[in-house]
Amino acid sequence: MKDGENMKKEKIMCNKCGKELMVKNGILHEDGLFVTKEWGYFSGKDLQIHQFCLCESCYDEFTESFFIPVENQEKRAAMD
């Protein structure tokens, strides 16, 4: 699966809880975390490509377990 291909699907599901993310007319109306990892040499998954999606709730649960918290920055809208 190529990058961005998840967004073209009519049905996108969280890999952890199975929740279906809202897609209307091919447009994602609910955000999630989409991860693509290309494993390299010196791993047990040499040359494999893994992909998964987490809904926002599962992302929050996952990152709350981190020893080092996720860095959070506010993004400002561009001023015209």
Image (cartoon, grey):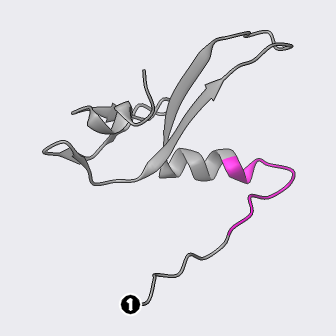
**Helix, strand or loop at mark 1:** loop
Q: Residue 63: image x %, image y %?
A: 69, 50
The residue at 56%/36% (across/down) is: 35
* Quarter of the image where one finds residue 50: top right
Frontmost residue, 74 versus 15? 74
Q: Residue furthest bottom?
A: 80
Query: Quadrant location of the C terminus?
Result: bottom left
Q: Residue 42: image x %, image y %?
A: 86, 13
Looking at the picture, does residue 70 appear above or below residue 65?
below
The residue at 63%/48% (across/down) is: 61
Looking at the picture, does residue 58 appear above or below residue 53?
below
Range drawn in magenta: 63-72
Position of 23 with respect to 6 (left or right) is: left
The residue at 41%/31% (across/down) is: 18
The residue at 66%/44% (across/down) is: 62
Q: Residue 27: image x %, image y %?
A: 22, 48
Query: Quadrant location of the N terminus?
Result: top left
Q: Can residue 16 be seen in this view?
A: no
Q: Residue furthest left?
A: 25
Frontmost residue, 32 versus 45? 45
Q: Which residue lies furthest to the front in this view?
A: 80
Would you say residue 65 sits in the magenta stretch? yes
Position of 53 with respect to 5 (left or right) is: right
Would you say residue 67 sits in the magenta stretch? yes
Q: Residue 69: image x %, image y %?
A: 79, 58
Looking at the picture, does residue 42 appear above or below residue 63?
above
Q: How many labels does the image show?
A: 1
* Quarter of the image where one finds residue 45: top right
Q: Residues within 10 Å of mark 1 (few under 14, many from 20)?
A: few
Residue type marked 1: Asp
- Give the residue at mark 1: 80
Provide the major secondary structure of the magenta segment: loop
